[in-house]
Image (cartoon, rainbow, N blue to C red):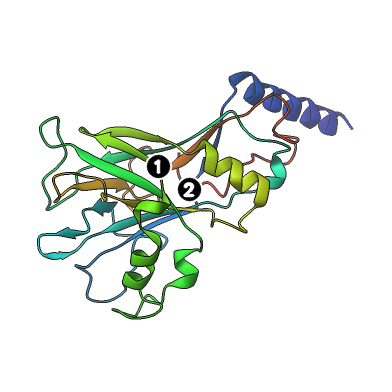
Amino acid sequence: MKTMYTQAICTLAFAAGISNAGIADIHVDQDYMSSGFFMSDFLRGEEANSSRASNRATSPVISGFTGETSYFSFNFDRSQFNGPVDQAMFRVENVSAGFFPDVSFENPAEISLHSLTSNPLVEIDQDLASGAGSWIDYRDSQITTSSIIATSTIDSFGIQEWDITALVNEWIANGDTNFSYTLGTSALLDPDGEAAVGFVNSSYVGFGGEFTARISVVPAPGSLALLGMTGLIATRRRRN
């Protein structure tokens, strides 16, 4: 009985702490990318203990090849909310893009987030190079200017953020009936072309404490249902 009482007190204290802080993090479940440079396995990075340190977002055409798209999927649970939230920010750390020129003050990149109507891992046949059901068919139908929900200028390494409050409130109101609990990325609005940004991959086998993708929610009063008592509203947490 004493143990159960102690656990109950700790749970209430945890919930109160989150409420006082006003922010709850929903950590990415799977993050991965597609690329015209891949000759097979056209979605990479989602596997456990991945050898891919980062996932990239680039211009639609870069170095003469079809560009790259990063995706971020969440096990979002709308039952944990009983109303809209005040704010929801998507945050992730960007690192070196590898063999492309890195962003800087002199070489910024306009990177957009996109709402998606279906889960790429479900819709895409990862063995198809082109045609219906391929990564390129999915990208061309989903990563469009009309699906952009937020755009940020990235001109340095570090934690970047985009405001996705309207989309998260759509998830809360309607679940995944309109939009998959997944975000896409692009440089469709970059004016110069040849933009490239690398995002920390949460399943990288050599992970060293970098800031992985998450949605940081600032709940309105009463908008979180039994936070803490049901386990964190977040998804399965890969990394801190």
Callout 1, which amino acid?
Answer: Thr
Furthest residue in direction top, as rendered: 20
N-terminal label among 1 and 2? 2
Image-quadrant location for residue 104 = top left
Please say if the residues under marks 1 and 2 sit with CB atoms less than 8 Å apart.
yes
Q: Does 219 appear above or below 201?
A: above
Question: Quadrant where the C terminus lies?
Answer: top left
- Residue 107: image quadrant is top left
In the image, residue 11 above or below residue 213: above
* Image location of residue 210, percent across then percent down: 34, 38
The numbered disc on residue 212 is 1
Q: Secondary structure at mark 2?
A: loop
Say few, some or many: other residues with alpha carbon within 10 Å of mark 2 (under 14 / 14 to 19 / 20 or more).
many
Decide which of 84, 10 is in the foreground and name it: 84
- Asked whether the viewer can see residue 170, the reply is yes
Q: Quadrant of residue 159?
A: top left
State left or right for residue 160 relative to residue 83: left
Mark 2, residue position: 28
Determine the residue positioned at 57% across, 52% down.
75
The kind of residue tagged 2 is Val
Residue at mark 1 to residue at mark 2: CA–CA distance: 8 Å
